[in-house]
Image: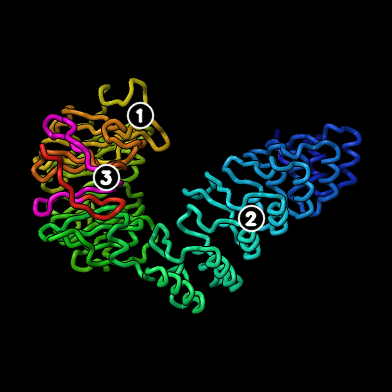
Amino acid sequence: MKPYEESGGTPTPEQSAIDAAKAGDEARLRVLLDGDPGLANARGWRDISPLIEAAGNPDSVAAVRLLLERGADPLAVWSDGYTALHRAAGGEVAELLVAAAGMPGLRARDRWGRTPLYSAVEDGHAEVVRVLLAAGSDPSVLAEDAPGSEDPLSPLDVAKDPVIVGLLLAAGASVHTPRKWTPLHLACARIVQDDGWLAVVGLLLDHGADPGRRTEFGDSPLDVLGVDGDAGVRARMTGILHGTGRSTELGLADVAAGEQRQVAIHPTRDRAVTSMYLGAALVEWRLTPAVEPVGIVRLPVRAATKGPYGSVGEMMAFADRRSVHLRSWQDLTESIPVEMPLNRSVSGVCWSPDGRSLAVTGAEALRLIDVQRREVVADTAELDDVGLGDWSAEPRFSPDGRLLAVGNSMQGVWWQTVLDVSPEGALRLRYDRESDKGEAPTNQRTTEVVTAVTFSPDGRRTATWVRPDFGIHRPNGYRGLVAVAWAADGESDWYQRIDDEMTGVAGDSSSAALCFTADGAQLAVGLDSGVVWFDTETGAHLGTSAIGTVLDLACAPHVGMLAATSNGLLRIQPPTR
């Protein structure tokens, strides 16, 4: 049923009742209900009812009371799971609805898991919040699938009114929410525009909010407040941190056991650089006599950035969704943009072995960039016989630079493209390799993506990691498949499926890091449970290293293999045979 305004017709009795309820026109609504009592539960556009429509008008108290008296269902659900209590815009309206709906109404969830209290907080209806809390609404209940957030959100996370924050805290709302951008971060950010949030910061701290907690980009509430922020607030948060033995700055002790996302090894020295906080911080590491951090560079970037991608030269590459830039080992603070018209989103990046060129994938194509000349020397979009993945395309050069392998994913299908690279940088399709039946995790069609590709040190083999698509779960904690093929022609060499039985730890589908040892004898697969080792020649499972979640692996003959993990940068060794 479409609204009559769109259809151009005369309103139906149902629509007339809904319109009267929306306007809070109790007299008109009474006439309609006297004529047809069933209109109290009429349904209109997207299944909205008169009561749900009336609830959104704070001046519709009389209409709401009448509808409830005439049998309107207080638990009726509109599209996306909204109830009348989700729509309540006034305190008196909320009181009537709470009395009619009871605890089931207070606990009702929409399709995103939001309760009426969450909606009232998000909409800024302080009086409704007051009524719902007094009736027993849980102030800490989480919306598991809140729109626009990867984390579950609590009412405190979406509160935009200092008064509402006070009501929630007084009712016992927890200040410790799953979201990394905490209520304390929010309050510190809002002080600049509204000093009414100064009191909120104090309340949050009174209730145990942590001034040392960092966002996904590594910002603490003090960082958000800024050096010019309120002196009293800064002093109080600083005092709390010092009182618990913590610093106001991100220190070496903090990063030593922190989550490292990617790692690059210096081509000649015992030195490495890792990224943290989605690329907003770089950490310099000394690798001998022990692996330890020696420097931290905080970057102003606040967009998720991949890298560092190391090379044989003095430059490392980094990439966000729309750009690629370089940083030197000598000066990590200086960002040098790769000035070229990408005009595409960036999916993957890798260096050529000589450090002269970058392969950049994105939007079903690959560009080869001469870094010294700052120009595109090849583009697969100009090759009629080459098609790459639209969602994931991971490129890797062979050690001699003559081949370029790309792991592709599109519409749940994976394949590997291998290109010949001429000395001048021209690209030509060598082959496309698709999975064979043996490499499928089941005999049935499945949805999979490639998240890693690498070459063996001698260039004879490629290894590819294929995992179930995000949100798809397989029996026995199936993580994914490592498929090893001959680089020259794409013929399968061996493959192994990794699950709970092999890792020894319960888990689920996972992205992976792939890396061969310097001598090429073993292949390491870095997963959520640690590293799983395989014999390169036979594919035999050699053992596991339970070192926590592994996010990246890198290896060089002069330092061995390094693992960027959830608890620091670690040097790892394959199992003894």
Reading the image, the residue beneath label 1 is 476
Q: CA distance from mark 2 to mark 1?
A: 41 Å
Reading the image, the residue beneath label 2 is 121
**Dot 3 alpha-carbon crowd within 10 angstroms: few under 14, some 14 to 19, many 20 or more:** many
Q: Position of residue 458 (x, y in %)?
A: 8, 40
Q: Is residue 546 visible?
A: yes
N-term mark: 2 or 3: 2
Q: CA distance from mark 2 to mark 3?
A: 47 Å
Q: Position of residue 311 (x, y in %)?
A: 16, 55
Is residue 122 placed above or below 409 in the rendered structure? below
Is residue 218 placed above or below 362 in the rendered structure? below
Q: Name the front one of labels 3 and 1.
A: 1
N-term mark: 3 or 1: 3
Q: Is residue 372 visible?
A: no
Query: Residue type at mark 1?
Result: Asn
Q: Is residue 25 left or right of residue 162?
A: right
Reading the image, the residue beneath label 3 is 366
